[in-house]
Structures are given as structure tokens and as C-alpha cells.
Amino acid sequence: MNASDVVQRQLKEDWDNREFEQVIADNIKSIANFLSSFELSCRSKLATLGDKINLLERKVEFLEAIAKTTAHAVRTVAPIKSNNSKEARIAVLEAYKEFQRLTPKFWWDFGLHDMPLGVFRAVIKKQFTKNAHLTDVRVVDRLVGETHQHMKSIRYAFYNPDHVRNYLFAENIEPKPKDFLSKFLNGKE
Amino acid sequence: MLRTSVSRCFQATNTALRSFSSGKDNLPVTRSHEAKKIDVNDILETKSPKVPVNVSSDETMDIGGVPSAHQEARTARIFRPAREATQSPWGNTKLWRIELDNRQRWENPLMGWSGTADPLSNVSMDLKFATKEDAIAFCEKNRWEFDIEEPHERQIKPKNYGQNFAWNRRTRIGTK
Amino acid sequence: MQRIVRGVATKAQQQRQLSAAANAPKKVEVFIDGKKILVDPGMTILQACALVGVDIPRFCYHDRLSIAGNCRMCLVEVEKSVKPVASCAMPVMNGMKVKTNSDFVRKAREGVMEFMLNNHPLDCPICDQGGECDLQDQAVAFGSDRGRLQSRLDGKRAVEDKDIGPLVKTVMTRCIQCTRCVRFANEVAAFPDFGTTGRGQDLQIGTYVEKFFASEMSGNIIDICPVGALTSKQYAFVARPWETRKTESVDVLDATGSNIVLTHRTGELLRVIPKINDDINEEWIGDQSRFAVDGLKVQRLLTPMIRGADGQLKPASWEEALFTVAAKLRETSAEQKAAVVGGLNDVESLVALKDLFNRFNSENVMTEEEFPETSGGSDIRANYIFNDGIANVENADAILLVGTNPRFEAPTLNARIRKSFLYSDVQIGVIGSESELNYDYDYLGASAKAIDDVLSGKGEFAKTFANAKQPLIIVGAQALKGEAGAAILGKLQQLADKLSAGKNVQVLNVLQRWAGQTGALDVGYKAGTAALRKTPVKFLYLLGADEGKVNKSNLDPQAFIVYQGHHGDAGAQIADVIFPGAAYTEKDGTYVNTEGRSQRGYPAVSPPGEARVDWKIIRAVSEVAGKSLPYNDLKEIRQRLNEIAPHLARYRDIEPSPFIKQALQLAQTSGSIDVDVSPALRELADYYQTNVISRNSRSMAQAKKAALENKENPYAEAPIHARL
């Protein structure tokens, strides 16, 4: 009995080992497959990246040429409302906070509550952050003024809910194709 | 579904007015014999110095509030229009014009009118410039690339009535 | 980015300036409205005023026609003269004082205008010329506000309409008898059957007996007529000029690259009228260029198509078509691929196709039209372009036409030859067919052997030619086919070399028949489809190749043929996949004319249906096939064009071609040239339908029919070419 138990145990261990080996071999094969396909895809991606780099290099040369030759008449003016970028920043933050205080009312009154309020707040925030790259104080002032006008219009209900939806989610309605082939298949321009 | 908030605003202003016209004075009172002369500069908040802003030639696109649909990078052609072949006067050929790349026009399914996705399709219609440089400045302001076509000047070759009757040349007119 | 497109003075202009400066006669001083100018003494007052910027109203005077002086609208006051003076005819004299806006002049103009309107019908609402009518504009500007005609009592005269063909509509009641059309027909179009009959109030303009206006320039009388008497039948009642938009572009239906203006409205092309370009087409265009645009609405390829297993072409989507073609492109090896291009393509699509094929290691790109490979073949540019420039034809002393009929191959060039014929003593010799050209010529024979005679100086014409100060040889591209073509080219280069010694003309000029040919040869295409027949081709890409030069029998039996073009013609019939492309009015393209002048054509309308711009289709094929071409928009592909050949980006300029001596060294001058070089287009009926667009055009079909019927007309006499 003992001997057969031992034999049984050994057989079981043997089978377990074999299974284990099998699993390892399978995994190794899959790793090998993955590596070879990865190599192929890498090669093709590198080729396309190489082409893209060529294109970009050409563009950069071109832009450098422009920057050197065209003389953008640089004159300096004194800004009107905010005197420096710090004041502009303060104005922007004030406008932002006021807008976010207005947001729950905006969200509810204009029938946008099919999305959670947090999402809507993020959408409003995006409208502010999409202009984060601006450095010209006068442009920032104009946009802040526009924001105040928007807030006034919202409070006085000048806007229609559908128009608000169109304006805020314009990019998502019909995302325009960016690369050549999609533009080609999509239409004539 | 839209609840107006106009009435609430009104209520807010009313309360402010009411407090102003109340008899209670929370305001400081100064009698004239106790008034002290204070320098203007002490009252005014210190102004931060204005930092001058560099203005580039295409600032209008950012400052002017041009809608984003109009801000696409287009290619313009600056030229002096050709004389209409069907008429003889040269009056319309003197001013410079800009023509943008022609975009697609299609038939609107509702009424059959001509629709286009191009907000700038009519820019070339009535926009005329006195000089080439003005047209170039306009294109730079709008961030359009441009090609300039040097105009073909009108060539006036001398002619005379006598060649209709020249006895030895082929320009002699035999008929009317 | 700005790119200045230069219209630098061509060689012809430079020559004229030099000659003008060399023998400039003493200038006379003239005072016009108090302004003093110095002019050459041969000028008329009207021209002198034009120099100052004063445009005197006129009806009968035209810059390119002889002076008639019969409308009397150009009357001005000259100081010492009692009567007003017709400024279009009176030459300037020293110290002349001219007043163009005094009361006297104004009264004269009002009187003339009143007379002209007295017999003019009240047709403005139904007249096609309304809005672009000289009579309307001048009546408003210079006429009086009221007329004295009692039309109920005196009535107006009326004239019957004349039938001069299916292209030009006549309403002769509106005619003001300015005789511009008569002078045009007599001088420029060489159709002397058009004239005036009767005198005074009964003067009628027409052909007297009903005849077809048998000229390839007949459409230009529509532009010339200041009123609505002669209008375009194709454009009758279509639109008013103020509601149309105008786009300047370039014509591709012949190789001269005439400048045209496309008139369009709401995305529909309405008509084509010429644009003035003194170097190429002056103010004229041929009838095909003008009227064949109605062929652009007919028989168009609107969707990609794939030939199914049952042999029928079925519409497919772009993705399917692109994938099918890309798969086949990758399967076939480089030697089994070939591309054949037709003659109406822009250089951008030619470059894209060649780049695509080069990426797949194939150089088998060729044009339908042949060109010899000797003398350096298409490597030396001077071999295949019109070296001297079309404008220089006016200065020629002697012209030799070999194997070409410029009247039907390039009507505007022929108009220039005729102009040179009228205004100078040029002698013209023709080797080819003895067809009616618009000028007198010496017929030297149908066989190219006659070139040997000219070389050796045998014959009257040969002597004139040898002694000419500015000789010109124009050889048609059709004559340079095959073995004999190579020998002909060699012999002509010898002749040209002998004659051009010491003169500043290249003498030898090749007149191409197709607008896309010069561009294709510039970019590196091989000429002629002979290479196709050497190795069996399994993948054939036809880019607008509709002349039937390639049959299925020339290819491997399992060949896969892709056709990209805008009309369904011979090429689309044999294709397995069809890509719908854009015609010349629908795409932004660069076209190189036969002089090597690169010009830019602009799109007026967008391609119909699912069609796309040609080079973009090829770029999409390349992307789907895995080897994307490195350009995504027009600017980038133009940069690529600039890389290949800088003249392609320098618009409206001619580059002088060097290496003529080297071409001569490589020339093959042996070999028999005893072949018939008669051109294919011999009579007017041949002219109207020569390319895929005009073959599909209704007006051109009607014109061809009228031309064929005109041959049986008993009143159509053989025209008189010269006037002396």
C-alpha cells in the first residue's frame, strides 16, 4: 500500500511536472511569437516614423526660413486693462471662480443634466484651459470680458439650450478627420 | 424648463437700495473743521507698471475675436484682374484683388440653393486694394499664404489707318 | 509664404525692346487734356490717350484689328480743327492739343449714341450681352438722358437673323454695324466670306448666302461684338455676368496653354472666355477650348468601379477600390508594372504617379504620344519644346512647317502666324498635307524628303529660307514618330544648326499636340508605348489615357488595368478598376505648355460625385499600399515639383534651353526620311473632336456635323489666303 501510494504520488508529481513544463513551453512560445511580431511591427512603424520625421524636418526648415525672412513689424503697445500678466491671471481666476459658482444653475436651467455636474464642471474648465497658451495680455483681457458677457447672458437667459450644447461640444459632434487618408475618404477637401 | 433668475437679481438690488435710504447711519461722519488734507497719491492704490506688449502683424486674428471657422490657413492669390474679353474698357483692371482657394459647393437638399462650408467664399467679391503691398499686408494679417502674380501690363502697339491702303503690303483691305 | 510669380520679359519682348531702342524715331509731343506726353509718331490719338490712362469710348476700334473709324464714338476735339476728329484713325502730330472731355466732345458723343440707339431694338432684358454690353455702358456714361425718336411714327429697322452655324447665335437687329466681326473674319480668322451687304441703313452683316462660319476661331467674334448681335449659342439665356464668378485658369485642350477665364455660378461651370496673354494667345482661343466645356457634364466617371467576376463594372466604395489596387500593386513585380498617361494631365498627378511607381522599383512610366530617343531624346529639353516662344513667331522672316497643321493643332499659334503673314513679308513653306491654312504657303511636298532639299538649298523656298534673318522651323510632334521620326529630328537639327549661326533664334521648334506632354517629358516620363510591348505587363495604370494606344492584346492575358480619369472613354472600357478623377476645370494644377512655360490652373468647381483630385488618389493608393508618398497637401507636392525641376514652380516664364549643340551631336542623321508626314487633322471637321472632353461635347458634335455638311455647300468657295 505504501509503495503504491508512493508510486502514485510520484506519478502525480511527474504529471504535474510535465504539465508545468508544458505550460512553460507554451508561454515561451507565445513570448517568442510576440517578440517576432513586435519586431515586424516595430520595423514598419520605424519606417513610417522616419518618413514623418523627414516631413517634419522639411516643415521646420521652411518655418525657419519664414521666421528669418518675413519681418513681422514688431512694435510695442501698452496694455489697456491689465497692466501685466499677473493682473491678467488674477482676472482670469476671478472670472473662473464666478463662472463655477454659476455653473450649477447653468447646468440645471439649460437642461444639461443628462451628464453629472462634475463632468459639466470639467467641460467648463476645459473652455478655460484651452486658452492656456495665450501670452498676450490684451487677448486674455478680451477673453475675460467675453466670459463676463457669457455669464450675464446666461443669467438673463439670452441663450437657447440647444445652442449652448452646440457651442460647448462642437468638437465632439463631428470630429474632423486629421490624416490624409481619412480626409480623402471623407470628402473632397 | 428654464427658470428665469431675473426676479432674484432684482430682489438683490432692492435690498441694497433699501439699506442706503435707511435712517441708520453706518457711515463715518467727518465735520469740515476736523478734515485733514491727505495727499492724492496716498489714497490711490499703487499702480503696477504697464508691461509693454509686442504686437505682431497678425494680432487681429487673436485680439479681434475672429471666429475659429474663419481662422483656417488658406492660400490666397494676389493679382490684378484680366480685362473682360467681352468688353473693351480697362477700368476694372487697375485695382489688386485677392482670391482664395475655391472650396466645394453643393446643392442644399431643402431648397436646391448652393451651399458651401467655406465662410470666406465671398472675400474676393468686393475686396479691392490700391497696391500690391496693401494686399500682402491683408494676407499676412489674416495668416493666409499668398502667391503674387505680376500683372501683365497693357501693350499698346502703334497702328495707323494708312496701312489699310498700303499698295504693297498684305494689310491692304480689299473688302469692307 | 509668398512666392512671387514672375512675368519676366520673354525673349520676344527683350528683342522688341532692343530693336525699339536701337531705331527709336524722334518722339512727338502731344497734349492730352493738358497733360503732355511723348509718343512715337506712328500712333493714333486714341492710343496716345490710352498711354496717359484716358480711355476714349469706341465701338469699332479694337487693339488687334485694323482701324475702321466707322462708329464715330471716339470723336475728340483737336485744337485747330473745326470738326471733331476720329481719334482711332488720326495719327498724332507734333504739338497736337487734344481735349477728350470738353462740351464739344460730349455733344458729339451724345449725338453718336443717339443715332446708334435709334435703330437698336429694346432687347436688353432678353439679350445675353446685358451686363457686359459696351453699348449699355457707354449709353449710360456718354449718352444723353433722352432720345428724340418717335418710334410710333418712324419705327425702327429690323434685320433677319443669319444662320452661321451651331456655335454662334446671331440676332442681327441688334447689330450696330461696327464691322469688328467682318475685320476679324477677314484678318484673323481668314474667312473672307463674312462681310457687309448693302449700304446705309440697309447695311447687313453676314455671309450673304447662308454659310457655316467655317473657321476654328469663330467663337472669338462673340467676344469682339460690342452688342448682343453675336452671342454664344451654348451660353444663350444661361446667366447674367453680375451673378457669375470668374476664375482665371489655363486651357488644356491644346498644347499652347492659352489663358482662359472660367465663368461659374453656384458650383456650375457656365462658359469659358479668353484672358489676354500677349505671349501666348493674345486675346483669342480656339473653338474647342471655348465650347467643349459642355462635354464636362456628360459621360463623367462619378464613383470608383470594380469589374466583377461577370465582366461588368460595378460601382464600389473608395476603400474597396483602393484596397484592390494596392493589393495588386504589391503582388506584381517591378518589371511587370507599367503606367501610361494621356495628354490632359497636370504635372502634380504625373509626379505622384512616377513617385508611386519608383517606390515600387519600376521606371515603366510612359506617355501615349511618341517621341524619338535619339538626339538625347527627352533628356535634352530643347528637343521637345517650342524653343523660340510663340510670341517670337511675329518676328519671323521665313517659317517652315513640317508635319503639322497649326491651324487645327494650335489655333492661337496659327493666328499669330497669320498675323505675321499680314504685317510682314514672311514666306511660309509647308511639308505635309496641302490643306487650307490661313495664309499662302509654298507646298514642298508630302514626304519628309523635302527637308533634304531645303538643307541642300534646292528650290525657291530653300533659298529664301537660307537667306532669312529670322527663320523658324515648326515641326509637329506627330511627325516625329518611330524610326523615321528620329531621322527627321536629326535632319531638322542639322538644318537648324546651319541656320541659327549668328542669329538669336534657335530656329527649331516642336509643336506638341497635348497639354500634358511637355510636363510629362520634363518630369521624366518615357515617350511612346513601345516599351509596353517588350515585356508582358501584368499591372497597368492608365492616367487619362484615352487615345486607344494600348489594347488588351498588348498586355499579359491576366493583366490588371486601373484607369484614372474623368470621362468614360477608351481607357475606362478596358479597365478592371476605375478611379474617378477631376478634369482641368476642377483641380489646382500646373501645366507646362509647348514652349516649356509652366502655368497654374485654378479650379472653378469641384469634381462631381465621388471624384477626387488626381494626385490625391495616387497618394491614397500609395498609403494603402504601404509606401506613403511624402506629401499631404498641395504645398508639399509643389515643393516636390520644385525639387524635380525648378521651372515648374516659376510660373509664366520661359527658360532658355541649352545643350542644343550636344543634341545635334547625338542626333541620328542617317536613315531614310522618305515618309509621309501629313498631319492627321486636315480639314475643319477633323478639328472639333480630338480629345476625350470634346468627343463628349454636344456643341462640338454639332459643329463637326455642320463642317461636314458645309463641304457640300455649293456656295462655299475655296478661300483666298493672301490679299495681294
Image (cartoon, coloured by chain):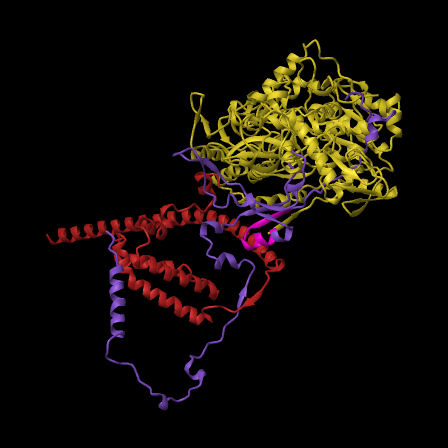
Above or below C434: residue A119: below
Front-lying residue, C526 or C469: C469
Q: Which chain is red?
A: A
Residue C174 left/right relative to C332 = right
Above or below C452: residue C324: below
Looking at the image, how many numbered discs can be counted on the residues?
Answer: 0
Above or below A30: residue B57: below
Rendered hue of chain B is purple
Residue B142 covered by magenta stretch: yes
Is residue C659 visible in the rendered image? The answer is no
* Residue C150 position in % (x across, y down): 62, 24
Above or below B111: residue C714: above
Residue C216 left/right relative to B100 = right
Highlighted magenta segment, given as a residue range:
B135-148
Q: Quadrant of the C terminus of chain C?
A: top right
* Residue C353 position in % (x across, y down): 57, 36
Rendered hue of chain C is yellow
Residue at the limit of the structure toward the bottom, as seen here: B33
